[in-house]
Amino acid sequence: MQKKKRVKPYSVGSFQKLIYDHYGKHGRSLPWRKTRNPYHILVSEIMLQQTQVDRVVDKYLQFVALFPDIETLARSPLHEILKVWQGLGYNRRALALKRIALMVVEEHKGQVPRSLDELVKLPGIGKNTASAIMAYAFNQPAAFIETNVRSVFIHCFFPERDTVSDEEILPLVRKTLDNSNPRQWYSALMDYGTFLKKNHTNPGRKSRHYSKQSPFDGSNRQVRGRIVRFLTQRLQSSEEKIAAHLALSSEKVRGVLIALEKEGLITRDGKRLAIAETTDQF
């Protein structure tokens, strides 16, 4: 019986050549790649959390047109921000952006922080998002992993493995990073990851951290979005009216409302429910 030929992982040099060759031929033209405005790049990174690029492009353009700078966003009521956000899902990200804007204006004189330590203090920004902002906004060589990056490294460096952890990937991300131009390097990595997902079985499924998302229809995520959409249109309502409008049981709606209230997305005044308009608690 003939032995299966072992697939040899890429060297650093051959890997970098592969990524940049593909980028040179197939690099995507995305609006946040055409700016060096740290605020606009921050907006794009928050929008891209758990959301595909195709769904983000138009919303990003609309968002930065209506809220062109961080001071405008800080002054804007949350219900207006949520109106623009509709369709992206995970509305808590819009709340995080509002809180980020307030914090940056109040504590950083309206300038997006240029250090990793300061960025991770902002609401809704973890180390990976902060590192991405460092790379894209300030061209600083910060190592991070997201879904496309993970897929590329699993495909190229762990071709015969069934389970790979981020702890194994991160040293390779650091080793192969183009320190002279991390902004372009990560853009190239992202595009190669997108290519792999379209032309191969998603390598990200071999990640130890991979989990298949539960169905959206009928989920609490769907109910959350419908409630927030309803309240941005009506500005205020009662639990009974919301349940009737959504054609759902009061028990189902009540549980979601409690979660939204705890997160700071809505407020309750007696029976009156409304989108929160004061977000000064971080």
Image (spheres, helix red, strand yellow):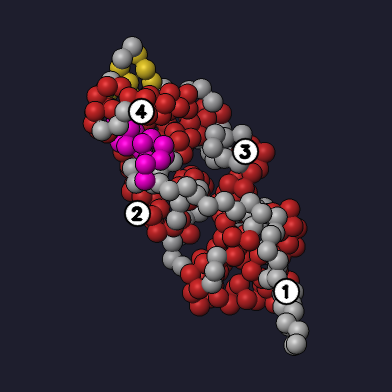
Q: How far apart are marks 4 and 1 (CA)?
A: 51 Å
Q: How far apart are marks 1 and 2 (CA)?
A: 38 Å
Q: Which residue is drawn at 55% across and 65% down?
A: 202
- Residue at label 4? 253
Front: mark 4 or 3: 4
- Residue at label 2? 58
Earlier sequence position, callout 4 versus callout 3: 3
- Residue at label 1? 9
Which residue occupies the extreme bottom position in the image? 2
Q: Is residue 170 above or below residue 2?
A: above
Front: mark 1 or 2: 1
Front: mark 4 or 2: 4
Which labelled disc corresponds to residue 120? 3
Secondary structure beneath dot 1 equals loop
Which region of the structure is painted magenta?
Answer: 217-232
- What is the three-letter code of the residue carrying label 1? Pro
Q: Distance between the residues labelled 4 and 2?
A: 31 Å
Work out which quarter of the rendered image holds the N terminus and state it.
bottom right
